[in-house]
Image (cartoon, helix red, strand yellow):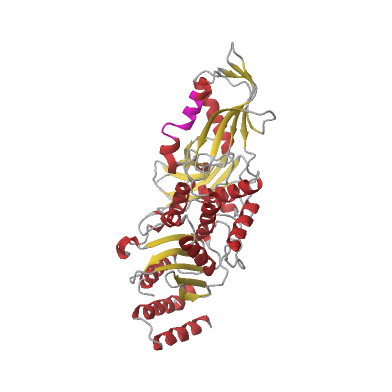
Amino acid sequence: MMFARLVIFAAFLFLSGISLGQEQFEVEINKLLNDPGMKGAGLGICIENLENDSVVFEINSNLSMIPASVLKIVTTSAALEILGADYTFKTQLLYTGKIDDKTGFLNGNLIIKGGGDPALGSEYFKDHYLKPHFLNTWLNEIILSGIRGINGNIIINESAYEEQSVPDTWIWEDMGNYYGAGANALTVYDNMFRIYFRSLPEAGKPAEIIYIDPWANWLTFENFVVSSDQNSDNAYIFGDPWGGKRKIRGTIPIARDTFQIKASLPEPGLSLGYQLKEKLESKNIPLKGVVKKGVPVNVPELISEIESPPLSQIINVLNHESVNLFAEHLVKQIAFEKTGLGSTTEGVKIIRKFWEEKGIDTNGMFLEDGSGLSHFNAITPGQLVGILIYMKKESKNAEFFLNSLPTPGEGTLYYFNPEKFSKQNLHCKSGSMTRVRCFAGYLENNSGDELAFAFIANNFSMSHSDLIRRIEELLLNINNLN
């Protein structure tokens, strides 16, 4: 029925004087809908012209569908508006008690207080945190404060966020892997560690773990990974965000001396505390107590404070590289600023209400997280386009937001050919998961008009690469739409 309506609609436009570009676009849409790989699938499209506020094309624009990572458009735009482009996160090193004037021993505790910084020690911000390494800076400032030993503990204060670091609706397969890392008030090093394997030259043989970086000495591993003729990483790590046990299943390529897979790091705050303990011991500063989580009873004294890059820079990385962890932090941080506790449930409520207040019809908008990793998220193509239009026309952060969206050949749009899109006229966020492929963003057409668009495809059976190629052709045809 949808196809029949589309054919009638296309014929009507043609008889009414439709442009050659629009006719070709309709033809390509018909071809896509008739492809066997789209049988039983859902397809939603919304395209609006920002110059004259007209709807250029739509199919199922009000159908609520799974968005995958294009949901990050909803999260990052709201964060820019609610928190501000210049907003920064702060991580503090403090102490309680007194420093003995004669011995230099602290009769109290060192405290690392997390402020929700998603980028602390991140690989994406090496110059900011690691040159020099922030732990070396802390060590120097501990020494400058006169501390020569600690009779107490290293306390990890993560009270800014709720204890549950991952949303309720994330699946078991995702949580142990790097892209499923949970958001903690004290996140560090992208909450990730690497496991390095050695594989034999014959397929089906057990692969050996040779080392882990950084070493997480409280974790235990059950390794079921085997070698394979497939030249790709098909290994998955299973484990909960708090537990110390990890199971690794799947395959890695044959005949590799070293092959790495990336895993999510449980209890990143404790990991950082142990690293600080090692730094202290390297300078003969003994710690009599232990590393543990808690909240100090007494008011602490500040030793050092680390400030993050501005939010605009964090969002630029987030959208270019589609960093789930950063997006989950933004949801919790919005809740923290509004309620005093970083909660995913409260954060998504605030974001949804924000867009409702900005005139977006939020019926059919279901937000379970900030990154789009939950299969329970749903949004309509029209809602995405509405948010894109708001950010372009009404937001003072329009330029920051636009620049955060990848262009062809970069970030998560690496597979689009930049030679096909002139003057970087396409800025687009992509999203994918099993049987889900989405694109949303801005495109300047050949007439110089700017279009806001959203494509959402769910439950298709064709390969992702085939659908990407088809959507790239549709985007090229949009160039001729008015």
Q: Quadrant of residue 302?
A: top right
Percent of width and height locating residue 398: 45, 57
Q: Is residue 238 left or right of residue 477?
A: right
| Quarter of the picture holding the C terminus | bottom left
Is residue 245 or residue 7 the one in the foreground? 7
- Residue 352 in view in this figure: yes
Percent of width and height locating residue 166: 61, 49
Numbered label tally:
0
Is residue 91 or residue 374 the one in the foreground? 91
Is residue 312 or residue 295 the one in the foreground? 312
Assess whether residue 190 is covered by the magenta stretch.
no
Is residue 294 or residue 297 the one in the foreground? 297
Percent of width and height locating residue 366: 61, 62
The residue sitting at the top extreme is 102
Residue at (51, 56) in percent of width and height: 77
Residue at (59, 12) in percent of width and height: 103
Q: Quadrant of residue 116?
A: top right
Q: Quadrant of residue 452?
A: bottom left
Assess whether residue 134 is covered by the magenta stretch.
yes
Residue at (47, 68) in percent of width and height: 455
In the image, which residues are magenta? 130-140
Q: Is residue 441 left or right of residue 325?
A: left
Percent of width and height locating residue 435: 51, 65
